[in-house]
Image (tube, grey):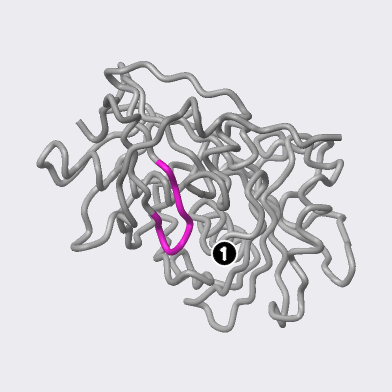
Amino acid sequence: MIAKAEDAGRAFWKMHGLGNDFVILDAREVPLALDGPAVRALADRRTGIGCDQLIILRPSAQADLFMEIRNADGGEVSACGNASRCVGRLLMDEAGRDAGRIETRAGVLEVARAGEQVRVDMGRPGLDWRDIPLAAAADTRELDIAEDGLARPAAVSMGNPHMIFFVDDGASVDLVRLGPRLARHPLFPEGANVSVARVPDAGTIRLAVWERGAGPTRACGTAACAALVAAHRRGLTGRAADVMLPGGRLQVEWAADDHLFMTGPVAVSFTGTVDLAAVAVREEMPA
């Protein structure tokens, strides 16, 4: 097993893909239920283990396992590309295989070894306004949204909604300030992951991401895929590109069958055990 409940607590893996980090718990044999406060406590970087997303592995009738994805704010989301690669590495190492299948809320993903890296088939992008979803009909290549110098973003669903702005100078954009406001734009009823992309050449995208429920992140796999799709639809890139994020490079290809393939490194930061009951306790400050 990847992780088991033990007398000293629940075992976990802390992993990351280009700095996008995860706490991974295994509930395939020992049941586990975590409410929002418990997830937030585990994700807290000062008093918990610390992570962008908490991942719970559960049994699956369709694949090798089911991957439940919880953002640092406690909410559940359907897709996470970097987490899929991390879980894929654990799954393949555990089974002694070079490929595996992971069920998510967004569908079943195929993962495979790519040398020392992991490649995941992220499926087909959602491009219709209802797929994102948007609150009203719109051309998802270019939305009528403008905010503090940013304008005309594209929208893509990768199992989660993405808003991508193309700019000439990404360093000048204060995404920490603008990201939370744009993520709650009324055109996106489920919120949005907000990205700022610069395309220096047809084979490279430089990307910064504000991830809904997690904030600024060193890497976001679904955002990297969404950015390539949006850039290609605008004629800025081919169907493959290196997506350069603050944490490093992801290779993304939009294949002829409409599937997106993402390849990149994963790493184990550390392993340990955690007393889930203790970490979820929040002391009330005196009035």
Quadrant in which the C terminus is drawn? top right
The residue nearer to you, when weighing 48 against 85, is: 48
Q: What amino acid type is highlighted by mark number 1?
A: His
Looking at the rendered structure, the secondary structure element under dot 1 is helix
Residue 114 image position (x, y, % from top left): 22, 59
Stretch of the chain drawn in magenta: 16-23
The residue nearer to you, when weighing 232 against 83, is: 83
Give the quarter of the image for residue 67: top left
Relative height, residue 201 to residue 216 (above, below)? below
Whether residue 22 appears in magenta in the rendering, the answer is yes
Please indicate whether residue 266 sits to the left or right of residue 52 in the image.
left
Relative height, residue 279 to residue 28 (above, below)? below
Q: Residue visible at 49% across and 35% down? A: 69
Q: Residue furthest front?
A: 286
Q: Residue visible at 64% across and 70% down? A: 197
Residue 148 image position (x, y, % from top left): 89, 68
